[in-house]
Image (tube, helix red, strand yellow):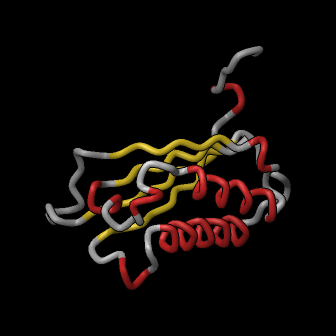
Amino acid sequence: MPHFVLEYSPQAKELLPAEIKDDWKPLFKKFHGIMNDQGIAPAPKCKSRAYLADNFLLGEDEEAGMVHLSVAFLDLPEPLTKEKLRSLGDTLKATMVEFFGGAGKTGKVEFSVELRLMPKEMYWRNGD
């Protein structure tokens, strides 16, 4: 079950068209579809959320913005090679850049993706 956590700065939010500034579901559905299409997890098993990061600093540039996606996996299909994980990260990052207006329009906004494993024995939910 992949967990997607998207953090974004006010500078990044300004790139979005007005009709999607407060509706992240279209982007989440794209993320879930990527997981499904690549055989990593069925879309109904994905969880996504987004948070505005008001307090952050990238290096020493107080004007720079950011969008960071963390994806934590409870299970990964075997075998999932480094190449496939790299491809997944590239696809997720490209999807974010496109959602925020495309590479030519993102200016001083940095996009990043982190993929990590979450051990099952360190995760609890209702019914466990």
Direction from residue 40 to residue 105 in the image, left or right: left
Residue for point 59% across, 43% down: 48
Residue for point 79% across, 55% down: 40
Quadrant in which residue 34 is drawn = bottom right
Q: Quadrant of the N terminus?
A: top right
- 124 versus 65 height, above or below: above
Q: Residue furthest front?
A: 19
| Residue 27, image x, y percentages | 58, 58
| Residue 22, image x, y percentages | 44, 48
Direction from residue 55 to residue 31 in the image, left or right: right
Q: Quadrant of the C terminus?
A: top right
Q: Residue furthest top?
A: 127
Residue for point 27% across, 73% down: 108
Direction from residue 114 to residue 51 in the image, left or right: left
| Residue 64, image x, y percentages | 22, 66
- 45 versus 83 height, above or below: above
Direction from residue 28 to residue 120 in the image, left or right: right
Q: Which is nearer the eye, 93 or 104?
A: 104
